[in-house]
Amino acid sequence: MKEIGEYCGLCGVIGAEKSVSALVAEGLFAQQHRGQEASGIAALDEDGEVILHKKNGLVSELMTDIPEKMMSGRMSAAIGHVRYGTFGGSSVINAQPILVRMADIPVAIAHNGTISNAGVIRRSLQRKGHIFQTNTDTEIVLHLMSRELEDSDYNIEKCLQLAISKLEGAFCLLLLVPRGMYVVRDTMGFRPLSLGRIAGGGWIVASETIAFPVTDAEYVREVLPGEVLFFPVKEGEGCCEPVSSIASREPGLFSTDSKRYAQCIFEHVYFARPGSYVFGDSVYEVRIKMGRQLAREFPAECDMVMPVPDSGMFAAMGFARELGIPLDMGFTRNHYVGRTFIDPVHATRAAMVMRKLQPIPEAIKGKRVCVVEDSIVRGTTSKARINALREAGATEVHMRISCPPHRHACYFGIDFPEEEKLIANRHSIEEIEEILNLDSIGYLSVEGMLSCVSAHPPENYCTACFTGDYPVEPPVNGSIR
């Protein structure tokens, strides 16, 4: 699919015997697929100061010149971030974590998601004299906190709780302060966030559980929707046990009358790595099930099934197994080219298609081919690939998509907000077949897609980009307000 941008990835570590910055870096490496535009780490030293290091590019580039002090064992906690810019520009100033001082208290913050009422809050704060240093919605949280300082008697925890009570949309937050680390997940649980226990002591929090094996950690549980956790650094304050938890379904400053969860089903379709557990389900198993269900709903008469690597791989496996048709690799992938869906420079996407995936004529020539893809958004890259398959000798090209047609915008952290650019929003199935030069196309139904997850009931998932049923009122005029 590779025509959309993904939000970001988070990792936080506290109380570990090993270097917390090194562990965070490993967690970010494992989640690099969640953003390739920029990365950063903030670490808390023994004096209660926060050291920040961030730059544009991959985590490997970040680590080439990370300060030696940050990698030492004297750091007690660290948070990290990989970024795709769903909000704000590509300048390094918009990279995260963001570090500020509130009443001379250092506060670092990292955020995954999109705050849907960010525009309204920003304009209100600007009218009250607030000056913003970045274009990100993340900075809004810090400004809201600063407004509560005096009334809360300079209690950072109260400031945080009051600030997040004003937010709408999708947000997972990690905050680093001299006393420890705060972990926040929005009340609807749009974005995944999990908690792990590091061998030898310490805690890790990450967007995906794929970060746990590489940091010698074991999965404990999901951070609950609406939950605020605090992990202190000093003995006598819990010894790094989470000492406060305010759930959205219980009385507290951070609460909601909403009875609805809205976990992003697109994590399972595309974004998350197959080795992760997201919202309690194995991404690998869900994608296999999606492929099998797709084959039951839209079988294809073909000689071979082939995936669009890598995200279409496991749905293709399930599709081929269900129909008993050989699975073969019709594309070879150049792994030195980044994800075209996550490239923030839209103009380069079409050129990157053939740079990244090239057909293998020996596998395709003279065959009826069924291509299994995770999704189609704009259709630009799909058309280029289909034409390449025909040029390589395919006699027929069919396509099966392991999610429903994208017809609506997403305002909760996924970069396809302009509905007029969504091919399924503007065209019928028959028109899409003609535009993409396909013999047939079939999409997985909404009901079929939701039948493939089991850890939560279907109604706990957000399907707004397919159905238009938004769990939060969408922004006015199709923009983040």
Image (cartoon, grey):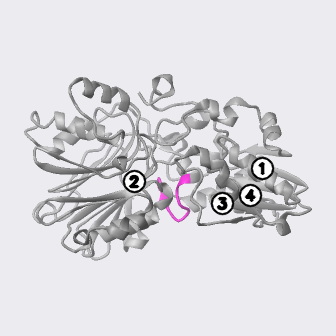
Q: Amino acid at mark 4?
A: Phe
Q: Residue 442 location, x and y as percent?
A: 76, 44
> Gap between marks 3 and 2, in whole Å?
30 Å
Mark 4 or 1, nearer chain start: 4
Q: Is residue 208 above or below residue 139?
A: below
Q: Which mark is residue 193?
A: 2
What is the spatial separation of the Cα atoms under label 4 and label 2, in whole angstroms?
30 Å
Does residue 58 appear in the picture of this structure?
Answer: yes
**Which label sits in the foreground, 2 or 1?**
1
Residue at 75 percent across and 46 percent down: it is: 383
N-terminal label among 4 and 3: 4
Distance Cα–Cα, label 1 vs label 3: 19 Å
Q: Earlier in the sequence, mark 3 or mark 2?
A: 2
- Residue that numbered label 3 is attached to: 356
In 3D space, how far apart are the residues under numbered discs 4 and 1 (Cα atoms)? 12 Å
Rendered image: mark on residue 399? 1
Q: Is residue 196 above or below residue 2?
A: below
Give the distance between the C-alpha atoms of the residues marked 2 and 1, in whole angstroms: 33 Å
Q: Residue at x 85, y 69 (%)?
A: 362
Q: Quadrant of the C terminus?
A: top left
At label 1, the amino acid type is Met
Tell me the number on the disc at residue 212: none
Q: Secondary structure at mark 2?
A: loop
Question: Dot 2, crowdedness within 10 Å: few (<14), some or many (≥20)?
Answer: many
Amino acid type at image mark 3: Lys
Element type where label 3 sits in the image = helix
Of badges 3 and 2, nearer the viewer stands: 3
Q: Position of residue 244 (x, y in %)?
A: 21, 51
| Farthest-out residue, left | 153
Is residue 57 depicted above or below 95 in this figure? Answer: below
Q: Is residue 301 left or right of residue 75?
A: right
Within the magenta stretch, is there residue 300?
A: no
